[in-house]
Amino acid sequence: MHDVIVVGAGAAGLFFAGSLPPGRFRVLLLDHSAKLAEKVRISGGGRCNITNLEAGRLERYLGREPRFARQALAGFGPEAFLSAFRRDGLSVHEKHRGQLFCDQGSNAVIRWLDARAQAAGAKRLMSTRVHAVRHATAETGFILESDAGSLSCRMLVIASGGPSIPAIGASDWGQVLARSMGLAVVPPRPALVPLIVQTPWTSEASLAGVSMPVRVSLSGQSHAPAFDEDLLFTHRGLSGPAILQLSSYWSEDQAIDVRWAPASLAADFAEDWVKRKALVAFNPERMLNGSDPALAMPKRFLQQRFGPSGARLPDLSAPIQQWPDRAIRRLGEVLLRDRLQPSGTEGWKKAEVAAGGVEVRELDPRSMQSFKHPGMFFIGEVVDVTGWLGGYNFQWAWSSAWSAARAISVILEGYLK
Ligand SMILES: Cc1cc2nc3c(=O)[nH]c(=O)nc-3n(C[C@H](O)[C@H](O)[C@H](O)COP(=O)(O)OP(=O)(O)OC[C@H]3O[C@@H](n4cnc5c(N)ncnc54)[C@H](O)[C@@H]3O)c2cc1C
């Protein structure tokens, strides 16, 4: 019998195994994929945004009860993770808003995670499917029917992640298993995902690839955060950090508000233009596109948004004197709060994470152990805790894995005595 079997040798599973005391327990990692930790490899564009300096902030996590994450994040937060990481000779650089990327790239992170797990004495079986899991008795623990035959363990750790990017072996297996064992599960949905928006002016392929800083929020939802980040036009809609962040809060039929104008354009700029138009000669296009360098909105965007298929306004390059006051005010409305209606998300193929998962009320926040099935633990993305873009999801994987490793070590030491 194994002391611990971990299903899923990804970020959380590997970090869990490497956080156990070296050589103390018989640990087996099982993964159905042939390749190790593919999501770590593709993360952060191959650079792996491993954590965030602000990853201890609970308001940056979503789920039915984000406060559940408090103990795990406090017990093993970004500082603790970084000191383990640096101790082994790896280093990080900060890119943007506390986002820490590995200087050596994501393959180095995988080698590090694997080396830690091996140093702890964990064995690993790849390309191995688990067909069934049974909770036998407290003495016999759990029995797994797998490609490697019937396996038993005292402690079972489910670290199988979420279903985003199925092409690299991602699945909702852990969530389905939890439900089959009587645990409540929030149905997984794509998060940190591009949104499909098809309006006459956005569907023009000429906008694809244009990126600009914006502020986005959910229309009429003051409790959800607004994001000041870059927005990227795609062939089918919108992406970029601003939209990925907002997508985690978005639900079907929800409209979104976009402030296209940079913060340097005062909220009452239209009224100001109405007053000044008799005194100063300028045209809106040149003003917005860069005669004031603090504005510099992309010309392609201005041409599409205010072109024949966009807002019905005078020619943007016409002198402001030719603009009726009403049209100037409408220009202000569109630039300051444009309402768009996404028709959906780009789905699991493009989502960076799954929101939803095993309901946290089923788990002990100190250990990630199931109340209904003592000895069974859920860590990482399979749990209903989802972080913002920017290293928060890996930090959740590290923190939840560490909590489970600490708790399991204590329980197993009890068996060994
Ligand atoms: C494109 C992309 C970029 C990302 N970039 C970042 C980033 O820079 N920073 C960040 O914080 N987060 C990032 N994420 C999110 C992050 O990768 C995940 O949140 C994190 O990997 C979750 O860790 P996990 O161990 O729970 O799941 P995973 O790392 O996905 O590991 C799950 C493992 O379980 C295995 N598995 C699944 N089903 C089964 C089964 N039935 N039987 C056996 N094994 C199974 C899988 O093969 C996999 O190895 C990114 C995600 C994507 C898709």
Image (cartoon, rainbow, N blue to C red):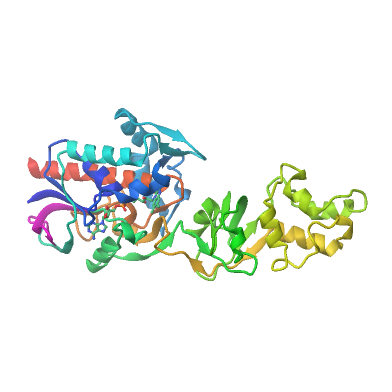
The answer to whether residue 195 is seen in the rendering is: yes
Q: Is residue 238 left or right of residue 362?
A: right
Q: Quadrant of the C terminus?
A: top left
- Look at the image and tell me whether residue 162 can be seen: no
Dominant secondary structure, magenta: strand
Residue 288, given in percent of the width and then of the height, sits at: 74, 50
- Asked whether residue 89 is drawn in magenta, I would say no
Please state the extent of the stretch shown in magenta in the rendering: 138-157
In the foreground, 135 or 325: 325
Q: Which corner quadrant of the image does residue 103 belong to? A: top left
Farthest residue in the front direction?
A: 206
Q: Is residue 148 magenta?
A: yes
Q: Is residue 368 above or below residue 100?
A: below
**Front in this rendered view, residue 294 or 137:** 294
Q: Nearer the viewer, residue 17 or 351?
A: 351
Q: Position of residue 61 (x, y in %)?
A: 44, 51
Instruction: Classify 54 as above or below 238.
Output: above
Residue 312 coordinates in the image, percent (x, y)? 76, 68
Q: Residue at x 46, y 44 (%)?
A: 57
